[in-house]
Amino acid sequence: MTNEQTVRHWHALYVRSRAEKKVLQQLEDMGVKAYLPLVTKMKQWSDRRKKIEEPLFKSYVFVFSNAKEYIPILNVYGVLKFVSFEKQPVVVPENQILAIKKFVDDYERGEGYKMMNNDELKKGQMVRIITGPMKGLKGRLESIEKKRHLIVFIDVVGQSIPVHLPRAKVEPVYEEEK
């Protein structure tokens, strides 16, 4: 057996909608190391409010696996496929998994989500991302939601993509910096 078939890497699984927790439990029962980033959110129904844990990435679960384990993992109820490129499961670098874990920890502790002065930010203003994997990117502030979350449009290869960020993750870009 080749070394490539036994070396484990992180991979992303695409799973059935709302089946993430069940898939995680089945994978763990099989002895497969798996990770489902969960965040606690307050949900409002017509008759009550409740804190619930929901996946950070809906329909995705990360697994630490090798080529020998692909078929048994694909046979888990709820797993649809490995996220692939050119028919090969994409390797998710360990540092990205660690960054996701750090983000979830910060989110749960409220770090980066502290209320900050929004008076200094205005719709249409240029802002810079100051932390995380997109650190240093600049974009135009599209909207401020609930005083803590921002939608920033960042131009990438001629296309604008919306990025949802906590207020504490951006700073204004002043005229002299543009």
Image (cartoon, helix red, strand yellow):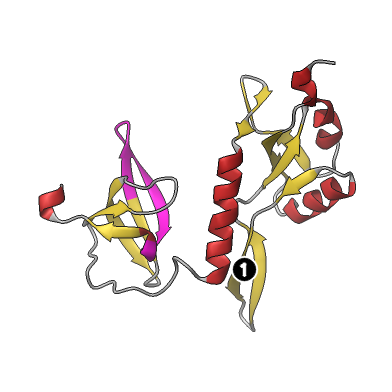
Find residue 82 and report its image quarter.
top right
Residue at (34% x, 73% y) in the render: 116
Pick the quarter of the image with the N terminus: top right
Q: Tell me residue 100's x, y (percent).
A: 57, 51
Find residue 30 and report its image quarter.
top right
- Amino acid of disc 1: Thr
Find residue 123 and report its image quarter.
bottom left
Residue at (62% x, 68% y) in the render: 40
43 on left or right of 71: left
Residue most toward the top? 2
Residue at (64% x, 75% y) in the render: 51
Residue sitting nearer the eye, 13 or 105: 105
Question: Which residues make up the magenta segment?
Answer: 153-168
Residue most toward the left? 176
Q: Tell me residue 89's x, y (percent).
A: 67, 27
Q: What element carries label 1?
A: strand
Say above or below: 121 vs 102: below
Q: Tell me residue 176's x, y (percent).
A: 10, 51
Say above or below: 122 vs 131: below
Q: Mark 1 points at which residue?
A: 40
Residue sitting nearer the eye, 166 or 20: 166
123 on left or right of 72: left
